[in-house]
Amino acid sequence: MAGWIRNARLGMFLNLCIGGFFILAAVVVVVSVNYNMREQALVEAQSKARIILDRNLATHTYFSRIMKPSIFAWSEPFRSKDYFDHTWMSSTYALREIEKFFKALNPSGYSFKDSAVDARSPENEADEYEKVFFENIKAGRQPETESKVRNIGGKPYLVVLRKGEVMEASCLRCHSRPENAPKGLTDYYGSERSFNRREGELASIVSLRIPLAEAYAAANMFSLKLSAILLLVLICLFGIQFWLYRRYLLAPLEIIREKANKIATQEGHLGEELPQPFGREIGELTATFNEMSVKLRHDRDHLEELVQKRTESLRESEKRYHSLFENMLEGFAYCRMIYDSDGHPADFIYLDVNSAFERLTGLADVTGKKVTEAIPGVKELTPELFEIYGRVALTGNPEKFEIDFKPLGKQLSISVYSPEKGYFVAVFDDVTERKLYEDKLKHFAVHDQLTGLLNRRGLEENLSRTIAKAKRGGVSSLLYTDLDNFKDVNDTIGHSAGDEVLMILADLLKAALRTEDIVFRLGGDEFAVLLDGIDGGDALLAAERLRAAVEAHRFELEGRVFPLSLSIGLVKIDGTLALGELLSQADTAMYRAKAQGKNRVVAT
């Protein structure tokens, strides 16, 4: 279906669409008119039904409340108890006979009757539909009036049902018990039907049927005539519309199509122009077509010149690219990845490299070679390099990383991306010197430059790990030391001699400790010692060993001997104190040792 629509001629497609739209519009109009006419006929029938019902109600009321009581009163003196005359004593009979006379004079086809259940006359007996309405009215489940369109005998009727008479006290003379009724009544109707009624009980309903067949037939005939008129009008409109759009739309488009075919098949028609048609849109299309035709002719005539210019431009672009490529400071390598049978990266081939590649790696003439041939042992020494290159070449997701390229003894910063699946480009730089400088900075950040010991920052990092270890059940101790009388050295022979003393002290402390213990210089003549795995008496013995080693050493500088000693504060690391609290307590213990006379150990 979609293919047929694409290949159909525009004129045929528009004709079918517009014709279909017109037919649909006509069908909607005819159906709407027919529906509204039927609704109007139904409204008129309902209005007529109200008039008929009201007229019969008025007749019934007059007969029951005025005429019959008057005759009863007039005939009372000479009328016997058993006398009964249905022609004037029964209002239902009188209305039925009046209706028969009316139908004979005006055969309109409508039907009216007083319907009752167990009626005395079969003509007034309710049918099944009327019985349901009668019983619902008695039970209070139904409005007093109901109207509905029903098919009876294959023809449509408006059926209107309305609540009728209610048993009054005056009615019970003929409708209570058979033995109480006039003998003439039981002789005429019998003693079985319409007796044993009670006052206030529903006696009958009014049933009215109005035929709708003629009105519906008239609506159908009018719809047929309207359809014929609309069809004629639509044919005229369609013909006019077809001529207009064929004259002013399809014909100019056909001219443009034919000219385009000629230009496509015969170059000699290039540059030809079409006359301007009527209408702005088609005119603009024609003008654009003419402009395109002239431009194509001009471009064809100057094609060789254009090709030459673009070739020169391409050469210039290639030259600039080559210059940039060769003068890059970073190394550049374009490679093809080789995978093994399991899909794992096994090797790669250098397809192109720049001068910086050769300068940074010291490798020459690698184009066309496998990396395992150019750099023996590279896969074993740097397997992660193959994993990254293989992943990028497979997924196309670029990555940037730094690697210790052991085969060349260099630290490299590499950016790698994939121009197409299975290939990758690596742009890299030698960051060996930068990494060495960073390592030095990291070393200086945590080490004292004079003694080479860890500094305060190094103490805090190690102490944090020791506290965490203590919380898991480990034991350790912290010593805070201060060199007694150190100020005398600086004041008498200068700071360079003081620096020499500090280096000697660092060596003394390291020599007096175990290999797992760590010595820190905090600044000036203050040192700290982290005793791993010991506390209590063992820690106190270690502190005494340090104090004794310093006391026993002869500090002789520039011909003078300085009596130097250590004041040491000892604190246990059990995980209960935070870092700041631990340092504060160790510092306090050390100052207590100095206050108590120096050259001693004080534990908290």
Image (cartoon, helix red, strand yellow):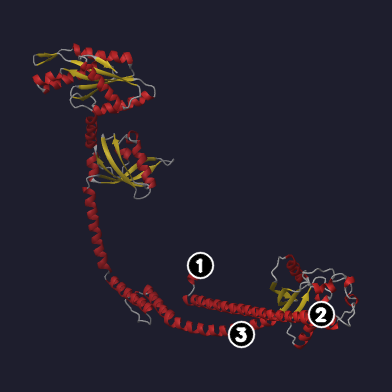
Q: Which residue lies at the image location 35% right of the left edge and 22% below the top edge?
A: 574
- Indicate whether 441 appears above or below 283: above
Judged from the image, the secondary structure of the residue bearing numbered disc 2 is helix
- Indicate whether 94 appears above or below 336: below
Quadrant location of residue 274? bottom left
Q: Give the number of the mark in front: 3 or 1.
A: 3
The circle on residue 2 is 1
Gap in Å between the C-alphas at discs 3 and 1?
38 Å
Q: Circle 3 sits on which residue?
A: 225
Q: Nearer the viewer, residue 386 or 540?
A: 540
Q: What amino acid type is highlighted by mark number 1?
A: Ala
Q: What amino acid type is highlighted by mark number 2?
A: Tyr
Q: Is residue 157 left or right of residue 532?
A: right
Gap in Å between the C-alphas at discs 3 and 2?
47 Å
Q: Is residue 412 left or right of residue 564?
A: right
Residue 462 appears in the picture as rendered = no
Residue 322 appears in the picture as rendered = yes
In the rendered image, which quarter contains the C terminus?
top left
Pointer 3 or 2: first along the chain: 2
